[in-house]
Amino acid sequence: MEKGRRGKPQVKNSKRKPIIRILPLGGFEEVGRNCMVVQVDKDLFIIDMGLQFPEEDMLGVDYLIPDISFLKGKEKYIRGILFTHGHLDHIGAAQHLLPKLNYPPCFGTKLTMGFLKKRLDETKISSKASLNTIEYGKRIRLGSCDIEFFRVTHSIPDSAGIAIHTPLGSIVHTGDFKFDFTPVNEPPADFSRIAGIGEKGVLAVMADSTNANKPGRSMSEKTIGDSLNRIIRDAEGRLIISTFSSLLNRIQQIIDAAKENNRKIFISGRSMEYNIDLAQKLGYINAPRGMIRKVSPAINKMKDSEVVIITTGSQGEERAALARISLGVHRDISIKKGDTVVLSSNPIIGNARAVATMINNLHLKGANVLTNDTLDIHTTGHGYQEDILLMHRLLKPRHIIPEHGEPYMRSAHADLVKSIGYQDNSIHLLNNGEVLEFDANGNARKSKHRVLANDVIIDGLGTSKEGEGKRVLADRKQLSSGGVFVAILKAYSDSGRLVGDPDILSRGFVYGSELNEVTAEAAKVVRKTYEEERATGEKDRKAYKKAIQAALHRFFRRKLNREPVIVPIMIEV
């Protein structure tokens, strides 16, 4: 008991309802980079740590990861990182972010944890991580909340939705999902458990929006399996089938069809080899002993009618196996007349041009290329409108937060749920960094305060600091369109007088026929600007460089209508 201001005893309210906040750090303005924080009082739960593949204008960038600035200083309140499934857009940033958060415990299903361990092995930190395998339907206690994983169907086995059970009702994250009544190599979604969670009371659901603008229901994997079987049965020559290395159910379909048609499987691509090996060890891919082999020169000793090659590179990635095959630079595989190449995927946004170029190269080398444009050889792992509505009808949430998708996808999701009676005050369209708060009565409002959610780029072995990514990309865009112009000035350290004329270097800026004239005029501009600054008594090098940059920018706009990156360099002698 405590005394109040007037001396009267006051009893602490042990049943005080918690304050709940939803904070998206990624996945709400793009496809990828999925990362969501759910705060219940001081307890923090992180759902997914994914990467985003670069778009066409993100020059030189390998991928982007979430900005976790908000979590710095709060590491002791992180009760767990909950992973919905094993795709890179949900686990791919973990090796960068776990060390920064002092390795909080990670939770996920068996295959998801297997893929996460593989990801952490790449940077040799898996021994430092706490990886915990969770069974569907089994509750675990983390901080003040019970956590439950429930089965959903996606394009990778062991996908899960996650329920965080709070005193105000459950917070549910659907993960990536569709309702496939005839899935491959795994049970369908757990309708009963999803409905059971709904009956107990769901405060809010964060639901996949990827295909919210597409009417009907998404195609079943069984249809794809039937198409692949016909293609493998009817092909007279070799088959080269490219798909994502994480689409284990699709790979199992190819294996089953190859077995039925007396063909051997050959694997090309490092990630494909590793994922298939891991999936076999964990029991998610089944094949007779000796049926699956790595690509080697021995493939050329087999009859073409006995060969199926499964390879990476369906997105036209420059270094992936299929791109190298299309260019004729693969060590063991060369396209020959009679080969059939199957792209069992759809181009990710930003990859369409690279895929088209690769298809053209394959055709030029004599291959017959089959895509999803003409045959049912790929289906999405994300539900269409009827799937999304079914999920909401089963869960019956008070509030709906469309997630996982670009703004137009999430807007379509919002419009869709209005058709089943949800009002604007129950539908919350958030952007990365915005905060949704729930009061003790379960009412929601968007906070006036935001958290940082900048672009953080991974570039080779380098990582941009939070907020630097946009500046780096802006520089690269300018370099790609205008080239670089370097002016090197030598000056005496005692007097500041220039030694000779400025040296000029440029790359990707002007054509050779213009170079001498432009260089000579630019050198005069540099010398004149330097002398004018020197006449004012200026001593600061930065001021000289800034003045030279401005003068050259004006000169190049007037002379050439070009804007190169300008780099003045000053050397004292």
Image (tube, helix red, strand yellow):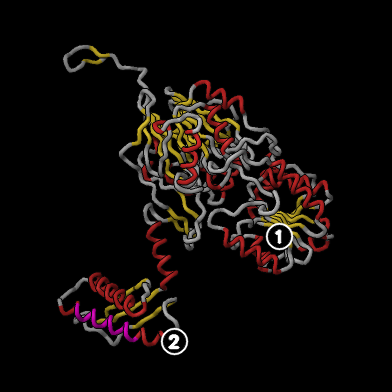
Q: Which residue is mark 1?
A: 369
Image coords of residue 166 (percent x, y) = 44, 25
CA separation, marks 1 and 2? 44 Å
- Disc 1 is placed on an element classified as strand
Q: Is residue 21 magenta?
A: no
Residue 9 left/right relative to 178:
left
Image coords of residue 29 (percent x, y) = 45, 47
Residue 518 left/right relative to 109:
left
Residue that appears at 56% across and 38% down: 385
**393 over 125 or under it: above or below:** above
Ranked by sequence position, the earlier of labels 1 and 2 is: 1
**Residue sitting nearer the eye, 232 or 426:** 426
Of the 4 image quadrants, the one containing the C terminus is: bottom left
Question: Which residue occupies the extreme front position in the image?
Answer: 419
Q: For residue 132, say whether it is visible.
A: no
Dot 1 alpha-carbon crowd within 10 angstroms: few under 14, some 14 to 19, many 20 or more: some
Q: Which residue is mark 2?
A: 513
Q: What range is drawn magenta here?
A: 520-532
Circle 1: residue type: Val
**320 over 17 or under it: above or below:** below
Question: Which residue occupies the extreme top position in the image?
Answer: 8
Of the 4 image quadrants, the one containing the N terminus is: top left
